[in-house]
Image: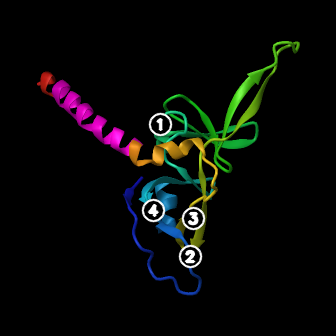
Amino acid sequence: MFSEEEQTSPTSSSSSPPPSSHFIGRKEDVVQAKRVTKLVGGRDVLVLCHQGKLHAMDMRCYHTGGPLQEGDIEEFDGRMCIVCPWHKYKITLAEGEGLYQAVNPSATPPKPTWCSKGVKQRVHQVTEVNRDVYVTFNDSPDTIDSDFYQTERYRATMNKAQPKTKKLHEKVTSRKV
């Protein structure tokens, strides 16, 4: 996996990338890495390759900001999902829907079924032009739960928390010596 700041695309020969798209990397690099995180246009994005198809979504889980790049890909009710490593929330790769299992207690025997919470994770369009991978943001004006983790307020909170975590780690490490 690699992570880097936004960069401009290498020159494309015949086709050009979509307007307002962001260069992610060469397709072979993305496929080899399987998962790429990148800050583009002020947004933290995860681009992943699963079964030969590229998907893009906000990098942090809509629930509590878990690192989706560390999540497993699993199939639930015929839909491919990324599973947040923190709380096991299931998010469809194609639509960003949150899935959960429900049981009708009056059914005999009770049978669990997969249900949708609706779109919770912002997914983005991936385009390939001359073996370069680009992401175009989902520009829906509707607020989606994962949007919170793309705000300056959240980043400022995370930046304040990181020094404390680092100090705690240093303390624990120094005690082991």
- Circle 3 SS class: strand
The type of residue carrying mark 4 is Gly
Q: Give the range drawn in magenta.
A: 154-173
Q: Name the residue under label 1.
A: 66
Q: How crowded is mark 4: few (under 14 residues within 10 Å), some or many (20 or more)?
A: few
Circle nearer the N terminus (3, 4): 4
Q: Mark 4 points at which residue?
A: 41
Q: Residues within 10 Å of mark 3 (few under 14, many from 20)?
A: some
Q: Do the residues under discs 1 and 2 have CB atoms within 8 angstroms?
A: no
Q: Residues within 10 Å of mark 1 (few under 14, many from 20)?
A: many
Q: Mark 3 points at which residue?
A: 136
Cα gap from disc 1 to disc 3, whole angstroms? 23 Å
Task: Tell which residue pokes out farthest to the bottom in this image.
Answer: 14
- Circle 1 SS class: loop
Q: Do the residues under discs 4 and 1 have CB atoms within 8 angstroms?
A: no
Which is nearer the eye, 62 or 102?
A: 62
Image position of 40 (left or right of 126): left
For residue 21, what is the image quadrant? bottom right
Cα gap from disc 2 to disc 4, whole angstroms? 16 Å
Circle nearer the N terminus (2, 4): 2
Q: Let me know if residue 37 is in the magenta part.
A: no
Cα gap from disc 4 to disc 1, whole angstroms? 21 Å
Which one is closest to the eye, mark 2 or mark 4? 4
* Residue 96, image x, y percentages: 64, 46
Cα gap from disc 3 to disc 2, whole angstroms? 9 Å
Circle nearer the N terminus (4, 1): 4
Which is nearer the eye, 140 or 54?
A: 140
Q: Is the magenta stretch mostly helix, strand or loop?
A: helix
Cα gap from disc 1 to disc 2, whole angstroms? 31 Å
The type of residue carrying mark 3 is Thr
